[in-house]
Amino acid sequence: MIPVYAIASNIISSLGMDTAAHWQAVTMGRIGIKRYEDKGLSNMPFMAAKLDPAQWQAIEAQTRSEQSLTPFEQLANCSIKKALDTLDENIDLKQTVFILASTKGNIELLGQAPDERVLLTHSAKVIADLNGISAKPVIISHACVSGVVALQHGLRLLQAGKYKYAIVTGCDRFSRFVLNGFQALQAVSDEPCRPFDAAGKGITPGEAAATIILSAKKTGKPLGQLLSGATSNDANHISGPSRTGEELSAAITRALAEANISASQIGMISAHGTGTSFNDEMEAKAFDHAGLLNCPVHSFKGYTGHTLGAAGVLESAMILESLYYQTLIPSAGYTDLGVPKAINITRQTQQAKIDYVLKTASGFGGCNAAIILGKTY
């Protein structure tokens, strides 16, 4: 089987404009969640992880010559450009596929622009063309597993020999639509989200773009290797996850088998960890079923909020940093266990031997995804 490597990454969120800024935030214990009072978005104060005006100015400056881009497209394109800029040598764009993961895209344009302009297919084509990628782009819009599934799909395309490179970008913006939707479900916390914590009150919405460039060619010093992936579905409820965690566990087990490693070899778990009791309890049960109760676990959403389609790519980029620094990521906001299984939540940054990391994600419709990344040095 063709090995697939991660050779570059970028993250743009409330924590900063590149991956290094996000790792620095983790080491300093800094989160990107703030309290807002904005009647244009909500009639009540809310917590969110939003990009600040200075960040948007920098993003707009980079794409100023492209007047036709929407803010969503500007954000995604900026992340791609920054990831490409970190490469030591240019990749062959004729052998490259662009994969865009998003749950909402330009949804705020509904009723204000032609329907075609709102479609993710249109956005992906615009972005691919801007970056000189001639292959037909791929859209993954599969609720909150979109980013993880996009990486898995990139892995499959490269393993099949369809392309030499895949630029995988996850992007979603903060909007009234997203905030009001989660408020309607009574799932939004009035304080920064606290995944897996007994005092957790729900999610914190966020926005971000994140990019990981995958390669079927090992050049220089890769950030890590994408080893395997699997998906499953609960077939339980449109917005409520499995009560047992068996379905996510099945995806984890298949990903482990494909990577040809055992549960005991996983050195860290980057969980979906939204901060809602339904999700966090399900994941804890899934880790128990998969024999991973003792493995160090964190959720990154305590830093950047829930960035929807960007989350899986963003959190995987942070896994690559963790592999490089051989350091566990603490779960921001965690104090006391609030799930029925005694999972091993990381409370502070600490050195550890980490050869393989499991990334999980779950979303509306009962979808689950799991990928495994490993170090290459």
Image (tube, grey):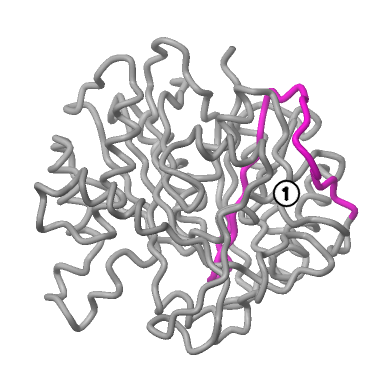
Residue at (64%, 62%) from the top-left corner?
A: 274
Relative height, residue 231 to residue 88 (above, below): below
Q: Is residue 377 left or right of residue 131?
A: right
Q: Which of 43 and 53 is in front in this view?
A: 53
Can you give x and y, in whole percent of width and height, for residue 373 in the image? 58, 31
Choose top left, top right, bottom left or bottom right for residue 71. Answer: bottom left
Above or below — where is 184 with respect to 279?
below
| Stretch of the chain drawn in magenta | 342-368
Q: Does the magenta stretch include residue 357?
A: yes
Query: In the image, what residue occupies the spot 71% across and 28% down?
Result: 327
Q: Give residue 227's quadrant in the image.
A: top right
Left or right relative to 344: residue 31: left
Asked whether 48 falls inside the magenta stretch, the response is no
Which structural element holds mark 1? loop
Residue receiving disc 1: 331
For the C terminus, the quadrant is top right
Q: What residue type is labelled 1?
A: Ser
Look at 35% across and 32% down and name the residue there. 83
Q: Residue at x 47, y 21 (%)?
A: 3
Task: Tell me if residue 60 comes above or below residue 305 in the rendering.
Answer: above
